[in-house]
Amino acid sequence: MQKKILLIILLFQFSAVGCSSDKTTDILKQDIAHLKTQMVDTQKGNTDAEMRVSSIENRLQNFEEKVKDLENQVFNLSAKVEEGIGIEIPAEVEAEKPSPEPEVKELPSTQNTSKEPFSPQPEIKELPPLQPEVKELPPPPKKEEIAKAESKPPEEIKVAVTEEKKGEDELKRLKALPPEELYKNAYDNFVFGEYDKAIVAFKVFLDSQSKSELADNSQYWIGECYYAKKDYKTALSEFQNVIQKYPNGNKVPDAMLKIGYTYYALGDKKSALNELNDLIKKFPKKTVSRLAKEKIKAIEKGK
């Protein structure tokens, strides 16, 4: 009887330990999953910073190389000037040199004082015609061509055609780039203030990489470009697209912050405060929430 009781007690303890072990395992699994999520968010958040540092390093290296080239060119030119040799005169300059005036010989006296017989003056040949030969004129322009030319100033037409050609060439170049290089190109343009070029590059990236991990980043930076250009209405729309198209993306908190800023820039203080307070409630531990609190204080003080 005592053995049976002891056996029952042991079985009860083993079952209790098993249940406790299962609960502990579940908690550990949840913690691991949470840590993985935080790591992914951190890695995504650091991508832009790494891209920016790499871009600045590349630009600095290019500037250093250009400075060295300029120094070499200045040194070579200085050496040539000091020696006074080795500098070729362009053909155009050579052609513009004034021709030396013909030597004026003393005219013979009208009186023949010498014993030699009078020598006749050389025959003067007929000079060539001064006017150049007139070539056949081209046919007059057609009425359609005249109408097109009159519709726009010549310089405006030339500029428009040139810009259109440049835009087409740039699109072809961007589409041929690998995704990572394309994103870096777009971000570099943003960093150095080339906002229009950055917008085009980010949109090309989104067209081909809409499911990429950097898609929400690209959408966000498009909004930042318009915000930097002070096109606040377009910026607001682009920031809202971040939340609508990528609700689970890592750029949602940043987009909410900039939506608040943009509302304030447009003079809508009420919407700005609502958006910033909503950000603080949803993401209280994010850095952007601290920035949102500071902005709320500034708005309430009337700054």
Image (spheres, grey):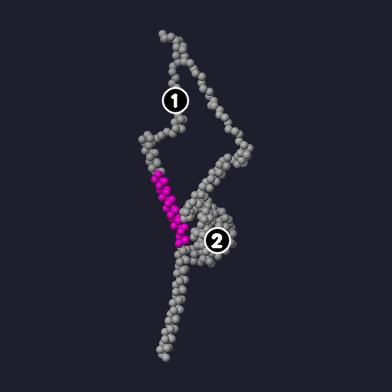
Q: Compared with residue 39, is residue 141 higher up or lower down, i.e. above or below?
A: above
The residue that disc 1 covers is 100
Q: Position of residue 60 (x, y in %)?
A: 42, 50
Do the residues bearing badges 1 and 2 touch, measured as CB atoms within 8 Å? Answer: no
67 relative position to 147: left or right:
left
Secondary structure beneath dot 2 equals: helix
Could you classify mark 1 by the number of other residues whose Cα lies within 10 Å: few (under 14), some (14-19), or many (20 or more)? few
Amino acid type, residue under disc 2 in the picture: Lys
Please report the residue visible at 47 percent of the width from the left and 15 percent of the height from the top: 122
Q: Quadrant of the N terminus?
A: bottom left
Most foreground residue, 59 or 143: 143
Residue at numbered disc 2: 245
Q: Is residue 20 left or right of residue 261?
A: left
Please provide percent x and percent y for residue 205: 51, 55
Horizontal and vertical percent position of residue 92:
46, 32
Real-space CA distance between mark 1 and mark 2, rounded to the nearest whole angstrom: 79 Å
Q: Residue furthest left?
A: 83
Which is closer to the viewer, label 1 or label 2? 2
Image coordinates for residue 233, horizontal then vertical, percent: 58, 56
- Which corner quadrant holds the C terminus? bottom right
Magenta part of the protein: which range?
43-69
Mark 1 is on which residue type? Pro
**Residue 90 can be seen, yes or no:** yes
Question: Looking at the image, is 290 positioned above or below residue 13?
Answer: above
Decide whether the magenta segment is chiefly helix, strand or loop: helix
Which residue is pictured at 57% across the width and 42% down the height? Answer: 157
